Amino acid sequence: MSHEIRTPMNGIIGGTELLLAADNNLNAEQKEVLGIIQHSSEAMLMLINDILDFSKIEAGRIQLVSEPIPIRDLLATTVNVLGQQALSKDLDLFVDVFPHVPHFILGDTLRIRQIILNLLSNAIKFTKAGQIVLIVDSEFIEDTGRHVIHFLVRDSGIGIPKNSRTLLFQKFSMLRDNASKQIGGTGLGLAISKSLVELMGGSMWISDEISDPDFQCNAPDAVPGCGPGAEFHFKIPCAGHNYPPEECPDNLCLKSPPFSGDQVLLIKKNKLIANMLTKIFSSWGMKTEFAPTLDFALENSLKFPKRFDYVLVDSSFLLSETPETSAERRDKALSSSKLTTSAFENGNPSYVFDSFKLKELSTRVHDLKSKLVVVVSLFHRKEQAQLEAHVDKLLSNPIKKPHLFRCLKMIREKNLEKDASSSDVTSTPMISEESTFAEQFPLTILIVEDNLVNQKIIKKMLVKLGYQLEKLEVADNGKIAVEKVRHRNSAENSELISTFFQVVFMYIFMPEMDGLEASVTIRKTREISPDFQPFIIALTANAMRGDQEKSEEAGMDLHVPKPVTVVALTDALVAAHRAISRGTPRNTVKK
């Protein structure tokens, strides 16, 4: 059932995503209809996933795996999935992992990610203004030698009445935001999440009230329009370990404050999130000054003799409204049939970058010999070139602590180089990001897929990322794929080695020879030396745990379930490029 449903869903979701992302001449009404199709398709996919998971739980067929999880990396990629949904509602999404949380925990990556996604997506759905934070803490239990990892998701949303809380974790129960309006969903998400946590030996619950008084809607720094909020917790016991000292990344093993004495000006609307960032800056030895608006910063902070090493500003301050404001469009969208903010934001944007504001800020910052960092959402990436001409570094929103650390470290090291050479500080960007994804991650790709619609969707997605259409090869089944890889990657064909297939997207169910058999055959082909074995990415409409294990046993390196999205595709290509660049050995056949 999973295979039969997910295969056509891949064409619907993938095709809609491509149309919405394209720079085309669609009018607002056409884009609105596409947004409805996208939202409806995603809702259908959620329903499919929930029903399949719930049926497996009821049948006692959920099998958990235990694997090392770099918890901070997992949270960063998970937040990226939902970041745009939060930003489209003007919500701040923030993750804070306490320093003593182990670098790695042993657990089921997919299931932990699924639980966090469910809690965060619920928080975004029920929050109209303010913020959502994910906090991760841990406690070491000496008697067992294990850690108990505590995940907390706190929002400033509509809250949950006490008389409704007993129903939250029951199957097919759904919360209403008032006496008559039901928020969409299957009513299975929290029931499934709680069952998965309990299978891991843990527990899940909701707090009676928000434990942080700053989060309450009557707090001095509360965002206008926020609600009483909700706070969900889950704890799981697991083994954990840290990097060896010689391999530990700088941001995790701090021997001394890395930015001691540096000063940062933080220009941000949300004071609560600014306070959380200030605590992080303080732990790094930095001093922070807060400005609630860009005008306030220009009038009070960015004036001689004040000097900041870094000026961190949200890109929202550099936008100007078009005649149709985002509030008007949000009201219009939310009043229509189940059209979410994530859908209508794909239409004509309500804001455009204000070049005057950008130039004024850039000039003031660089006149004071400071460095300008703009926190920008993916929604604004089309204006990235305009930003890069005036800023020193772009930082993606939502802000992730490891990315923030690397950003500031790069600026600091660049400053030290300039000081040593006695050259002037300029506003020239340190790293140019004008190149396409394909130029940053060049790869030779083979697509193995028997469905013509899915072939076209994947090729169009890759072309959208900058890969040349004429260089993307396709095989209609596993047998053809084996021959193509044997011919191109064989050491005997030395003239073709420079263009050998580095990545193979391999669909599992195909005629003549399926993807599993094709992968095994490629791995066992003697003419292909280990150095020229491709990175094989499994594409399957079956999203069950056993399917991933079968892929790994067949020698595949990565597993991507259908429907394939651009985000999933780029994550897979980045992983492939990283493995190839580092010389990481390909997976081997385990059967």
Image (cartoon, helix red, strand yellow):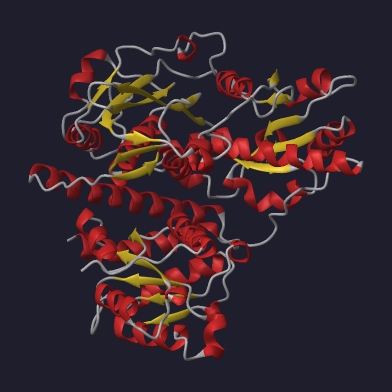
Is residue 374 something one can see in this rendering?
A: yes
Q: Is residue 140 above or below residue 353?
A: above
Quadrant the C terminus occupies: bottom left
Q: In x, y percent, where is residue 60?
A: 9, 44
Is residue 325 something one can see in this rendering?
A: no
Q: Quadrant of residue 184?
A: top left
Q: In x, y percent, where is residue 5?
A: 23, 61
| Number of marks in picture | 0
Q: Is residue 302 above or below residue 171?
A: above
Q: Residue at x 55, y 50 (%)?
A: 347
Q: In x, y percent, where is residue 101?
A: 41, 28
Left or right, residue 539 beside residue 194: right
Q: Is residue 381 above or below residue 289?
A: below
Left or right, residue 33 beside residue 150: right
Q: Residue at x 54, y 32 (%)?
A: 253
Q: In x, y percent, where is residue 387?
A: 74, 46
Quadrant the N terminus occupies: bottom left
Q: Residue at x 54, y 39 (%)?
A: 329
Q: Is residue 531 above or below residue 89?
A: below
Q: Quadrant of residue 180?
A: top left
Viewer-proximal residue, 255 or 126?
255
